[in-house]
Image: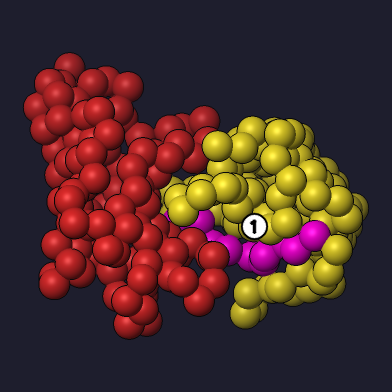
C-alpha cells in the first residue's frame, strides 16, 4: 500500500490559536484522503473526505469553518483546527484511499491537546 | 442506524490461545467490503484482513482469519495462537460501493495474558 506520513504526531496549543496537521502520501498520488477524529478508547469518526483540487465533503455535524481542509496537491492534505478550544483535544488521523479494492493506508495520527 | 456493531468492549485471552472478535454489519448494498484493523496504544491503524462480499472463501492472513457469514451479516475475526503483542484495540469496518468511506465499529480491546 501507499506510504502515508502525518505530522505532527503530538501538538499542544493554547486556546484560541490554530493548528495545522499535514497528511502526505509519499509514494502514491492520492485523489482522495479522509480525516477522522478519535476520542480515547472510542471509534474513529469520519470528519470529512478530502478531494484533490476541490472542496472537502464534510460529514453531518462537523463545522466546516472550524476544521478547514485543503487538498491542494495529489500528495498533501491539511487539516487546520481554527480557534482551538479544549473540547477540540483529540486524536486526529488521516487515511489515503490507496490502489486496489482494499487499499486504505492510515497516517500515524496526531494527538492534539488544547490548553 | 449503526452500520457496524461490535458488542464486546473488552476481552482477555491467554497467550497461545485463540480469540474470536464479533462483528455484525448492516447494509442493503450487494457489493461491499469488510475490514479489520488493529490499533495498538501508539495509535497507528494496522490493516489485518479484508473480505469482499462476493468472496466465496473466508479470508485468511497468517494468524488472522475472518469467519464470514453473509446471511447473518457477520464477519468475526479469529486470532489464533495469541501473542502478547496482540494486545490492542481491534476495529471492524465496512466500505459500501456508493462511496469509499469506511464505517467503523466501536472497537474491542483485547488483552493477552502471559
Q: Is residue B79 found left or right of B89 in the rendered image? A: left
Give the vertical position of B13 relative to B56 (above or below): above
Of residues B15 and B93, the one nearer the viewer is: B93
Of residues A19 and A53, the one nearer the viewer is: A53
Residue displayed at 11% across by 33% down: B18
Residue A91 drawn at (x, y percent) = 61, 47
Quadrant in the picture for residue B109: top left
Chain letter of the residue carrying label 1: A
Chain in yellow in the render: A
Q: Is residue A36 magenta?
A: no
Give the vertical position of B113 relative to B19 (above or below): above
Residue A71 drawn at (x, y percent) = 82, 57
Range drawn in magenta: A43-52
Kindly tell me whether residue A91 is visible in this rendering.
no
Q: Which residue is mark 1?
A: A34
Q: Is residue B68 found left or right of A103 in the rendered image? A: left
Residue displayed at 19% across by 26% down: B82
Residue displayed at 32% across by 22% down: B85
Q: Which secondary structure class fits the magenta region best?
A: strand
Chain in red in the render: B
Of residues A101 and A67, the one nearer the viewer is: A101
Amino acid at each position: 500500500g501507499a506510504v502515508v506520513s502525518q505530522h505532527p504526531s503530538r501538538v499542544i496549543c493554547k486556546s484560541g490559536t490554530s493548528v495545522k496537521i499535514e497528511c502526505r502520501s509519499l509514494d502514491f498520488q492520492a485523489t482522495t484522503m479522509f480525516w477522522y477524529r478519535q476520542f480515547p478508547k472510542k471509534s474513529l469518526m469520519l470528519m470529512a473526505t478530502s478531494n484533490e483540487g476541490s472542496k472537502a465533503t464534510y460529514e453531518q455535524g462537523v463545522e466546516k469553518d472550524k476544521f478547514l481542509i485543503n487538498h491542494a496537491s495529489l500528495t498533501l492534505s491539511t487539516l487546520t483546527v481554527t480557534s482551538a478550544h479544549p473540547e477540540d483535544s483529540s486524536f486526529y488521523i488521516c487515511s489515503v484511499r490507496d490502489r486496489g479494492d482494499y487499499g486504505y493506508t492510515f497516517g500515524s495520527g496526531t494527538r492534539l491537546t488544547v490548553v | 442506524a449503526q452500520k457496524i456493531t461490535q458488542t464486546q468492549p473488552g476481552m482477555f485471552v491467554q497467550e497461545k490461545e485463540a480469540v474470536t472478535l464479533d462483528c455484525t454489519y448492516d447494509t442493503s448494498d450487494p457489493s461491499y467490503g469488510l475490514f479489520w484493523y488493529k490499533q495498538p496504544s501508539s495509535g497507528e491503524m494496522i490493516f489485518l484482513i479484508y473480505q469482499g462480499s462476493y468472496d466465496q472463501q473466508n479470508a485468511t492472513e497468517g494468524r488472522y482469519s475472518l469467519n464470514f457469514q453473509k446471511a447473518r451479516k457477520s464477519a468475526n475475526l479469529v486470532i489464533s495462537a495469541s501473542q502478547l503483542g496482540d494486545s490492542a484495540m481491534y476495529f471492524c469496518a465496512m466500505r459500501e460501493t456508493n462511496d469509499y468511506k469506511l464505517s467503523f465499529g466501536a472497537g474491542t480491546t483485547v488483552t493477552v495474558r502471559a
